[in-house]
Image: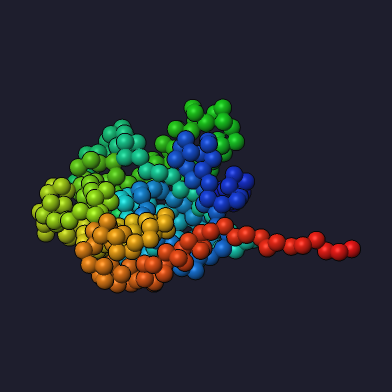
Amino acid sequence: MEPLLELRDSILRHAGGGPRATPQSDRLGLKFIVQRSTTGEPIHLIHEPLFGVVVQGEKQLAIGDKLFTCTPGNSLVVSVDLPVALRISTASPNQPYLAIAMALKPAQVATLLLEAGGADDADDLPVEAAGLGVGVASRELLEAIVRLVRLLDHPRDLPVLGPLAEREIMWRLLCSEQGHRLRQVGLADSHLSQLGRAMRWMRDNYGEQVRIEELARLSGMSVTSFHRQFRAVAFMSPLQYLKQIRLREARAQLLAGAEDVARVGQVVGYDSASQFSREYKRAFGFPPGQDARLLRASAAPRRKPFRTARAR
């Protein structure tokens, strides 16, 4: 059976009801994604480092001024925390969007590099490697994923053979056109890893006042180099990145039930309530209060209408 066809059948069998990590797949950091309809409005989220393959359907990722389209057989590598707008563009009840995602483990990548002697190739890496890339998955890579997914039906084999299959996937990915992006994940002193420290600081301290000089120092770079390489990795400037983090956090707080819009703006780092409302509307299409009401309404479980028994 063709790898994509076998993966399609496996995803529908293990997670036919929707996005799911089974107890067995969770041990390997695997997640199956099933979406049976297209998304009208983009889904705004922070993509953490991962590797994924689209098995069926199509999705689009917008980040900064870049748009990436992922179709069946495409591999996706996200090597740093990036704010994206995601849209499932092709899906239906009969032909749902299907994908598999795996968390990236820097220690695992570093071990492979050391064993293969690839850690010495750091000087050959692109100085500015984007933090997100889409490519075509090779047949060897797809077959390695198939071998891993098959183990989910054999729990006894999973603890022994699972790590080996996962290791093969990472190796195939390292040898692919996405390899340079993955190698930087495993190198602690790579530019991407250094920028990742600054990005994590911004995610953890989004409400604080930020000085670019401090972020550059945290990354071990000059301010000029930090700006240039940050934009190359994230497709946006450091301040634009921070704004995206703040707005997404504000949206999460409003969805969770926060009522004081001005207070939420202050918590995420805005001194001006009008600026917060203006930038929020520009990002999500509605002012904060209205957007929160719409989000809560769409997230609320729909009740079935009460029907009286028909007289016979």
Residue 169 shown left or right of residue 215 in the figure: right
Residue 121 shown left or right of residue 59 in the figure: left
Residue 312 shown left or right of residue 224 in the figure: right
Does 21 sit above or below residue 274? above
Picture quarter with the C terminus: bottom right
Residue reaching furthest right?
Answer: 312
Foreground of the two, 56 or 125:
56
Residue 179 shown left or right of residue 157 in the figure: left
**Count of marks, rendered view:** 0
Foreground of the two, 290 or 77:
290
Q: Position of residue 95 (x, y in %)?
A: 61, 60
Q: Is residue 242 visible?
A: no
In the image, what residue occupies the spot 20% across and 53% down? Answer: 208
Does 154 sit above or below residue 243? above
Q: Position of residue 40 (x, y in %)?
A: 49, 69
The colour style of the image is: rainbow
In the image, what residue occupies the spot 29% across and 72% down? Answer: 278
In the image, what residue occupies the spot 53% across and 36% down? Answer: 23
Q: Position of residue 162 (x, y in %)?
A: 48, 33
Q: Quadrant of residue 175?
A: top left
Q: Is residue 223 visible?
A: yes
Q: Position of residue 189 (x, y in %)?
A: 19, 42
In the image, what residue occupies the spot 21% across and 50% down? Answer: 198
